[in-house]
Image: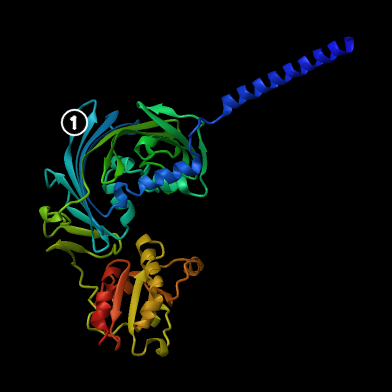
């Protein structure tokens, strides 16, 4: 009997211990578990990517009007503690054409009456080149000028305004959009186990440690997982606008130590079958190596989004509103002197003289040896480019994709690196991207070479007929087929 009581007591103790351990396990699981239905990291990124593919900058045709205000508080401003910018943006896009116009008023605080004159900016993409034009109001305060360049990306993005870009998913001008950063293999992702409320909306919270800083993104499942809030923390080694934070500085300012960016989306609308942020606020904080702090607060609202515009109703769209005679500064041909005349850039220099109708200059001067067997009775396409320039690299890559097609059409392609670069670096780039064409490099004075070949900007294409007489120059890749068809019988 005693043995039975002892066994029963032991069994009760074991059962009690089991119940205690099970309860402890349940409590731990509850404390650390993920709420039911919370997507994992890959699912959240995939959901957001699907929405981002329908965002504004991924569409070919639209008109957007936006209003924004930015106030910067900085210890580096002269005679003032803060500066306010009030801007109105109008942006037209029609596939490869883009026209962005900004009216800006800048004022200083605390002396609000100390107002800087209005400024108008216009960025236009025409024929694969971007033209930027600034006009001060009243006119005459600053010289009129245009800057022409083939570096499309950064200029075009900046032209839309930093706050408009933030609504479209760009946390920095010279940075990939948020959807691409989250999807990079180098990004380490983590989902918070429970939903959080942001501005009254339930959201999933995704954290990402990336080369561009630490991102925390609050994603709204009821709006295509669009962000309701984004916070970016950047340390000294994180990339910021293409450079490490510690390598960046402002004019006459110390280097950055860290940077913080906060985006709060106030309104998201369903437009054209996709969700788009139409109103939001931004706060950018820069901490300098000296301990100084600079903050910029921004507010932006999209007043109009038209995804089906009729540009026939906008006759001045894609027209640079510039008086004839305005001086033009060409970033791709800095020694040239140009003016704007009849809607185009006109050279004021005696040279370079057009090569149209003239025999192709000697390629040996560019260190290219093209055997007669590769050139006889063939059209020759010469591309002057610069490995250090994005648009030039794109041009060469596109030509490489058409190598077999051009060969079948009887076109011999040669390329000339138009500036002095490290030959090993050039060779490695050509090998990496499998460029199949002969590649030379200017051997004499760079500007003299450009004058000889009539190169006005880069990349610069020259096409001869089968007798090697120049029949076209300065055209774009989109015009190449037209030029080839016109020369095929010559």
Q: Residue at x 27, y 79 (%)?
A: 484
Q: Work out whether 209 lies above or below 355.
A: above
State which quarter of the image contains the N terminus. top right
Residue drawn at x 16%, y 61% is: 340
Residue occupied by mark 1: 114
Q: Is residue 462 above or below residue 375?
A: above
What is the quadrant of residue 168 in the picture?
top left
Report whether 274 appears left or right of 371. Answer: left
Q: Check the picture and name the quadrant holding the C terminus.
A: bottom left
**Residue 41 can be seen in this image:** yes
Residue at x-position 74% and y-position 18%: 15
Q: Is residue 407 left or right of residue 20?
A: left
In the rendered image, residue 204, in percent from the top left (x then y), is placed at: 44, 33
**Would residue 282 appear left or right of 258 to someone viewing this image?**
left
x 26%, y 71%: residue = 479
Nearest the eye: 308 or 353: 308
Residue 459: image quadrant is bottom left
Q: Position of residue 486 (x, y in %)?
A: 23, 81
């Amino acid at each position: 009997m005693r043995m039975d009581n002892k066994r029963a007591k032991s069994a009760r103790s074991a059962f009690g211990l089991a119940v205690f351990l099970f309860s402890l396990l349940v409590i731990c699981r509850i404390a650390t578990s993920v709420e039911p239905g919370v997507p994992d990291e890959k699912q959240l990124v995939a959901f957001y990517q699907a929405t981002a593919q329908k965002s504004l900058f991924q569409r070919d045709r639209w008109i957007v009007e936006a209003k924004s205000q930015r106030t910067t508080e900085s210890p580096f401003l002269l005679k003032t503690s803060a500066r306010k910018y009030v801007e109105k943006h109008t942006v037209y896009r029609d596939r490869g054409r883009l026209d962005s116009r900004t009216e800006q008023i800048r004022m200083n605080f605390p002396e609000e009456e100390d107002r800087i004159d209005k400024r108008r900016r216009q960025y236009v993409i025409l024929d694969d080149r971007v033209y930027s034009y600034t006009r001060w109001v009243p006119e005459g305060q600053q010289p009129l000028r245009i800057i022409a360049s083939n570096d499309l990306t950064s200029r075009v993005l900046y032209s839309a305004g930093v706050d408009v870009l933030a609504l479209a998913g760009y946390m920095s001008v010279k940075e990939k959009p948020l959807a691409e950063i989250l999807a990079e293999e180098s990004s380490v992702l983590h989902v918070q186990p429970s939903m959080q409320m942001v501005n009254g909306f339930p959201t999933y919270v995704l954290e990402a440690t990336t080369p561009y800083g630490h991102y925390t993104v609050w994603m709204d499942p009821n709006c295509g997982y669009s962000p309701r809030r984004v916070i970016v923390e950047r340390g000294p080694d994180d990339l910021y606008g293409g450079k490490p934070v510690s390598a960046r500085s402002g004019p006459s300012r110390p280097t950055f130590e860290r940077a913080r960016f906060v985006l709060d989306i106030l309104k998201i609308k369903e437009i054209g079958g996709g969700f788009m942020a139409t109103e939001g606020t931004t706060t950018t904080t820069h901490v300098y190596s000296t301990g100084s702090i600079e903050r910029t607060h921004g507010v932006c609202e999209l007043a109009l989004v038209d995804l089906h515009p009729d540009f026939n109703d906008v006759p001045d769209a894609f027209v640079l509103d510039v008086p004839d005679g305005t001086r033009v500064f060409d970033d791709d041909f800095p020694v040239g002197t140009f003016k704007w005349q009849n809607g185009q850039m006109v050279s004021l220099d005696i040279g370079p003289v057009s090569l149209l109708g003239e025999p192709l200059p000697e390629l040996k001067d560019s260190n290219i040896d093209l055997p007669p067997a590769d050139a006889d009775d063939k059209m020759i396409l010469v591309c002057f480019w610069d490995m250090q320039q994005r648009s030039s690299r794109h041009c060469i890559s596109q030509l490489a994709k058409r190598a077999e097609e051009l060969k079948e059409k009887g076109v011999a392609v040669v390329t000339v690196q138009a500036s002095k670069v490290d030959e090993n670096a050039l060779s490695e780039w050509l090998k990496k991207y499998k460029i199949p064409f002969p590649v030379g490099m200017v051997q004499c004075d760079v500007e003299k070479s450009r004058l000889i070949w009539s190169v006005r900007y880069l990349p610069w294409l020259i096409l001869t007929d089968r007798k090697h007489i120049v029949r076209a120059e300065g055209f774009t890749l989109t015009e190449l087929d037209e030029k080839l068809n016109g020369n095929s019988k010559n």
